[in-house]
Image (cartoon, grey):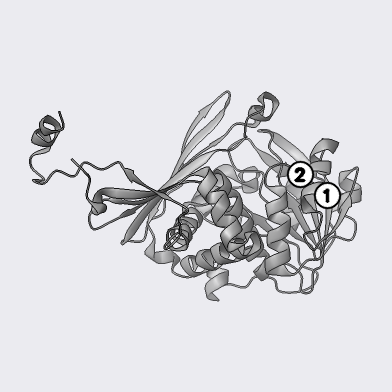
Amino acid sequence: MKPSDKALVPFVSVDHMMQLIHHVGLEEMIVGISEEIENDFKRWESFDKTPRVPAHSPHGVIELMPTSDGEAYGFKYVNGHPKNTSEGLQTVTAFGLLADVYTGYPTLLTEMTILTALRTAATSALVGKYLAPKGATTMAMIGNGAQSEFQCLAFKAICGIDTVRLYDTDPAATAKCAANLAGKGLTVITCTSGEEVIQGAQIITTCTADKKNATILTDNMIGAGVHINAIGGDCPGKTELHRDILLRSDIFVEYPEQTRIEGEIQALDADHPVTELWQVMTGAAKGRKDAQQITLFDSVGFAIEDFSALRFVKKAIKGTAYFEPLDMLADPDDPRDLFGMVQRSK
């Protein structure tokens, strides 16, 4: 039996996602995803929200990240296995799904390894638009792995930076990042230490992979007026910043119930004050207040950001060849006769 069109689900493969990026434009796609995220954060209260559901092991973590706005449902499956790099594998892989709440039918299935990098960069730079010092031109990028180029180009496209300073404990990673950013409209400066990389940077992004309580930035490295985009600490027992930096900063988070478990603020008391980003975006709370303020985005990634990215992709693939229809839903002529459909398929 040939499936009906309503039973076919658009699937965006890794190859299709890459083609879609070239079709739309990398920076344009990051900007488009950031606009979807901003719009969804401004209607934050309409979403179902829950901390992601993790399965931890000695090897890493596997997580499910679900949410719904009452009309559409979305989830992402994602892993984080820092040891994978030494085995020639990706630290993070992911896929995601959208579904119609009214019928429960899936409406999109897509790879999200690449899409997660895009949405993480889009979120970082969107938050930077609200929190970074006015007129910031230079960002320090500490940790030059799989996310780094996306982060740099997102801050260029959304916040207007023109210079990035790169540092990684692995010089090969820095060389890779610098080579990939060549010709992308940024001045790229490679550095050999954490102290060197932050010189002259108004924005500092930390994105390291080790699943441990690390000190990528010490308190004496952080001067007044900077914006810190801390995206590496994203599970229990994994942080990047010295605790004293947090005590000097105004901290902004996506969803406190999740960030207090996984973010930099897991090192602080449970009642330490933080500001939720959706409140900044709606004008209910202030973001950057003055030039001396240290702002810290304690980023762990939240399901609404994935939901926004999935909806962007669903719209972007319409009228293109960058997906294939999957026969993944049983669709008998009589909804009550699933057995008969199976028998007739013989």
SS assignment at label 2? loop
Q: Residues within 10 Å of mark 2 (few under 14, many from 20)?
A: many
Any part of residue 284 in sight: no
Left or right of 54 on screen, residue 114: right
Q: Reply above or below: 308 against 330.
A: below
Nearer-N-terminus badge (2/1)? 2
Lateral position of residue 284 relative to residue 164, left or right: left
Q: Amino acid at mark 2?
A: Asn
Is 252 located above or below residue 281 in the figure? above
Q: Position of residue 28 (x, y in %)?
A: 61, 65
The residue drawn where x is 62% and y is 52% is: 299
Using the image, determine if residue 3 lies above or below residue 201.
above
Quadrant assignment for the N terminus:
top left
* Residue annotated with mark 1: 166
Q: Helix, strand, or loop for circle 1?
A: strand
Depth check: give the residue in front, 266 or 44.
44
Q: How many marks?
A: 2
Image coordinates for residue 275, horizontal then vertical, percent: 59, 63
Residue 144: give its label.
Answer: 2
Instruction: Tell which residue pokes out farthest to the bottom in this image.
Output: 283
The type of residue carrying mark 1 is Leu
